[in-house]
Image: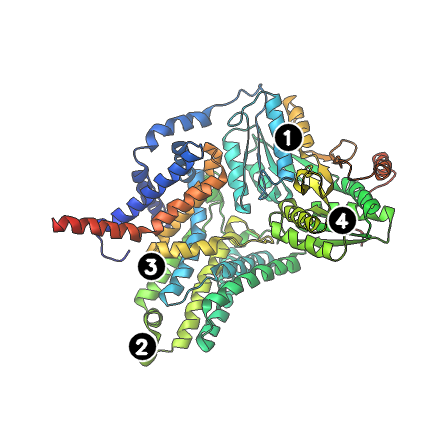
Amino acid sequence: MKSKFNSKSILVPLISIVLGLLIGAIIMWLSGYDAIKGYVALWNGIFGDAYAMGETVRQIAPYILAGLAVAFAFRTGLFNIGVEGQLLVGWFAAAYVGTTFELPTIIHLPLALLAAAAAGALWAFLPGLLKATLQVHEVIVTIMMNYIALHVVNALIKASSGTYKTETIHDSASLRSPFLEQLTDYSTLHYGFIVAILMVIFMWFLLERTKTGFELKAVGFNDHASQYAGMNVKKNIIVSMMISGGFAGLAGAMEGLGTFGYITESTDFTGIGFDGIAVALLGANTPIGVLFGAILFGSLKYGSLNMPNAAGVPIEIVSIVIALIIFFVASGYIIRVFLEKMSKKKEAK
Amino acid sequence: MKFKKKGLALSVMMSAGLLLAACGGDKEPEAEKPVDEGTATDTPSNEVLSVAMVTDTGGVDDKSFNQSAWKGITEYGEANGLERGDGGYDYLPSTKEADFKPNLNNLVRRDFDIVFGIGYLMDDAIKEIASQKPDTNFVIVDSEVEGDNVASVMFKEQEGAFLAGVAAALTTETDKIGFVGGMDIPVIKRFEAGFIEGVKAINPDIKVDVQYVASFTDAALGKGAASRMYASGADIVFHAAGGAGVGVFAEAKELKKASPDKNFWVIGVDSDQYEEGKVDENTNVTLTSMLKRVDVAVTDITERANKGEFPGGETLVYGLEDEGVILADSRGAISEEVLAKVAEFEAKIASGEIEVPEEPVK
């Protein structure tokens, strides 16, 4: 993904996607379904018409933010598995601010977004603090914080609304717009994708163009050297976790202020936070890479809904096929090694 | 400013599209045609109406609620010579709540005449899409949604649950009975209320242990709740928890296998769950099931609609009298005397002598 731009950087992802599609097709054929019909359905599910494209973009937005959250922490040497929990508290905060206050949009919407980011940041603060001061490994703490978030959020929904879901947010806090609905034939597409893209730019700017970003990266490369160079390592670890949590909280706001407009009690995680890990790794932890990773993930996730719809492939088989495609994209390294061996052989001749 | 961003997003999307297009290259175009034709075929509107449903997150094989609805739709389709697919009958599964709207929309776009939304949790989605697509008729089960093109289906779960309570109270030997609820929502509250009232009508001293597991899908939670109830002495557990109730059966079967002399009854819900309770050839832990005949409602509505009388804007309530709720055949698990007593109460409810509350009396 780095600037070394040669034939391989296009060839590798291409080969991996084709391989994934091929193996997926074999699985479908083996289980007695028409693979070509299945892939046409997948394609139409993603790009078929304005509605499908609207829903696809809607699905991509939270993946971008979840991916950024994981990637940002990675760049500073931290493994934030707590994106899921930070997303949930962000979702709740956004829905709460959206329902409780009545303000003009120009204040209300930013406030709700900020609340979501702040809630996510706060949820990531504790793991950051424990890591910085007591060297408690952030992986363990963030995993546990996920469970705490899930059930605390459920309890908060119950306490604040008296039932299993919050009321729907006021229009003034909503990311949805009649214009986008019209444009995409009443899809749930909302302005969240603009927030997501702004955050991609923000992360790039922060890491590449500011002193803080430089320090954060330096701590990620080598914390001892950074300390020797006079940087405050502890502070940087905490700040990094909080920024990462802030991205995750915003991903929750996508659901709370856009897709749903409320939050319901849940026994399961949304899965977006965990998929965010894959998105970040696919994108080599760079902001632009995350964007592409999220597009791939979001498109496949949403488009696959159309496979049972248009091709009659059962949802279980669809999950396997989608997982295979992502599996092959992620294992691009194998293909890269293979290609290198091939070219070496040629040179030897 | 905003426009620029949008342009960027679009171009990013397009380029991704091109990328994918390039890879799929040789296979896509040839197959694209048949599908397009497929979606374009319309059934003439004076023919038998086509119907489809969207499941909630339990899925179509939840052995319970969704399955019952799908059974109704399949029977309707087969009886009217329809085929599965466009212009006939079909279903779409939802794996998470975010799938509701796209699934409903997909069915509308495939020109189904009637689209069923199964479950209370889908009411927001139905409300929104029904107002956007006034030409399609919708049915929401378990909730009330306003709109001329929406029929709402409700059940008097409390009446069926009352009978289950009567049967349980007369069968228990430990005077302890459990109730496992899915989510804490009005429809499940009606099960709870009726069940407790039914137990009280026989013996007010029996303790009913109520637990909500906050899920219709997680069998592990149902198993945990049942485990605790049986351990504390309950010998009958009634579940109204959809897929989570599968765990209740699992726990009861395990316990029964370990100590075959003791009773670990389960009362199933929605569909006849006799098969779920099979321990071996001669042993079964299913006492009975409280059937909620979503299939009856589905058949009723589709028949009406075929006569051109789709009950749009109406709320249809199915109770004991229309066999919308009923106890399943216990296959000998419940004694004849108890069944006689149950029939007695059934008559009283049907005649209006007993009115079963919708909410648990505290």
Instruction: Look at mark 4 in the image and give the residue it sits on.
Output: B261
* Among the two numbered marks 4 and 1 on one chain, the one whose residue lies closer to the N terminus: 1
Q: Secondary structure at mark 2?
A: helix
Instruction: Look at mark 3 in the image and give the residue it sits on.
Output: A286
Instruction: Look at mark 1 in the image and give the residue it sits on.
Output: B72
**Scheme of colours in the image:** rainbow
Bin the neighbour count of mark 4 within 10 Å (Cα to Cα): few under 14, some 14-19, many 20 and up: few
Amino acid carrying label 4: it is Asp
Can you see residue A195?
Answer: no
Relative to A241, does residue B232 appear above or below in the rendering? Answer: above
* Among the two numbered marks 2 and 3 on one chain, the one whose residue lies closer to the N terminus: 2
Q: Position of residue A293 (x, y in %)?
A: 37, 51
Q: CA distance from mark 2 to mark 4?
A: 70 Å
Amino acid carrying label 2: it is Ala
From the viewer's perspective, tell me whether residue B299 is left or right of residue B12.
right
Can you see residue B203?
Answer: yes
Amino acid carrying label 3: it is Thr
Question: Do the numbered discs 2 and 1 sit on residues whose CB atoms are within 8 Å?
Answer: no
Quadrant in the picture for the C terminus of chain B: bottom right
Instruction: Look at mark 2 in the image and give the residue it sits on.
Output: A225
